[in-house]
Amino acid sequence: MLPNTFIHLQGIGLKRELDLWQTGTLNWDDFMGNRPDAIPPARAAYIIEALEESRSNLATCPGYFTKLLPASQHWRIFPHFRDKTAYLDIETTGLSESCDITTIALYDGHTIKHYIQGENLDDFTVDISRYDVLVSYNGKSFDVPVIERFFDITLDMAHIDLRYVLNGLGLKGGLKGCEKQLGLSRGELDGVNGYMAVLLWNFYQKSGERRALETLLAYNIMDTVNLELLMVVAYNRNLAKTPFQKDLTLPTPKQPAVPFTPDPELIARLSNTSTGNPWQRRY
């Protein structure tokens, strides 16, 4: 989709881009080979120079495009850098940026990795450095700032935050709300949220019962692997608004098996002892 994109250029918005497509300028090569008559020579020269720079960054620099595109349009970079993309979600001891990380789940479309406080949490910093693109839900506001403070690192890779992409499609209500609107079911994890994740961790810390940790990991990993499906759905729905749907639509990814099984009895027990949901805005 990026070679068909013009809205990263100064002065070109969605309407002007659509005008270019409708008049036959479908991609960068079209513009360079046949400048539209409505664009003055001086303006065309700027656009050609900018497109040449875009072409030089196309294969290796996703961050070049995410810095220029509106957050709701970051879906456009996805297929170009999919093999360098990691889906990310963290669980924590609270809502503030000063809270501790309890678990992290990482998925790259092939392999699920998980990290646990007190076991292998530090391995995360090595593994995440292998990727050029992050996909999260609300990660720009929560997950990434918490990770950067907790590990004293900077995650400077390109970042597709699906909160903004899905909002642009009219899908709101947090990650779980978006999933429900798209007809996705979490089975035994339905109704579990970030606040429950805190309760599960606290129960595990006090009791040492592995079933609590495995339920937490099942939830954390479910959050993460679902991001790939939501990313593809968001990409295809946005693509449907363009002339390129027929050629560029992506197939629905196969959902991987979550390697941990939640404990419904423990979920019900903790649900009965909790009140309210202070995590609603995040989830």
Image (spheres, rainbow, N blue to C red):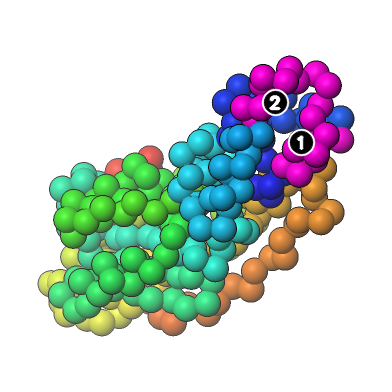
Please determine whether, in this image, residue 201 is positioned above or below residue 166.
Answer: below
Residue 241: % across, % down: 76, 39
**Image position of 9 (left or right of 189):** right
Question: Where is residue 214 drawn, in percent x and y?
Answer: 33, 78
Mark 2 nearby-residue class (10 Å; few <14, some 14–19, many ≥20):
some
Viewer-proximal residue among 126 and 42: 42
Residue 112 as seen in the image, left or right of residue 126? right
| 217 w.r.t. 270: above or below | below
Identity, as a three-letter code, of the amino acid under mark 1: Phe
Above-or-below relation of 237 to 60:
above
Q: In the rendering, at what x and y percent does residue 191 appear?
A: 45, 58
Q: Which residues are magenta?
A: 24-47
* 147 and 21: which is toward the camera: 21
Point out which mark residue 31 bears.
Answer: 1
Determine the residue positioned at 44% across, 76% down. Answer: 112
Left or right of 85 on screen, residue 1: right
Identity, as a three-letter code, of the amino acid under mark 2: Ala
Residue at image location 72% in from the left, 65% down from the top: 251
State the SS at label 2: helix
Q: Assess whether residue 38 is covered by the magenta stretch.
A: yes
Are dots 1 and 2 in contact, CB under 8 Å?
yes
N-terminal-most mark, 1 or 2? 1
Verify whether residue 205 appears in magenta.
no
Residue, far left: 206
Total marks in image? 2
In the image, 13 versus 230, the foreground residue is 13
Res. 44 mark: 2
Asked whether the viewer can see residue 166, the reply is no
Name the residue located 44 percent from the left edge and 82 percent from the top edge: 259
Tell me the quarter of the picture where residue 267 sits: bottom left
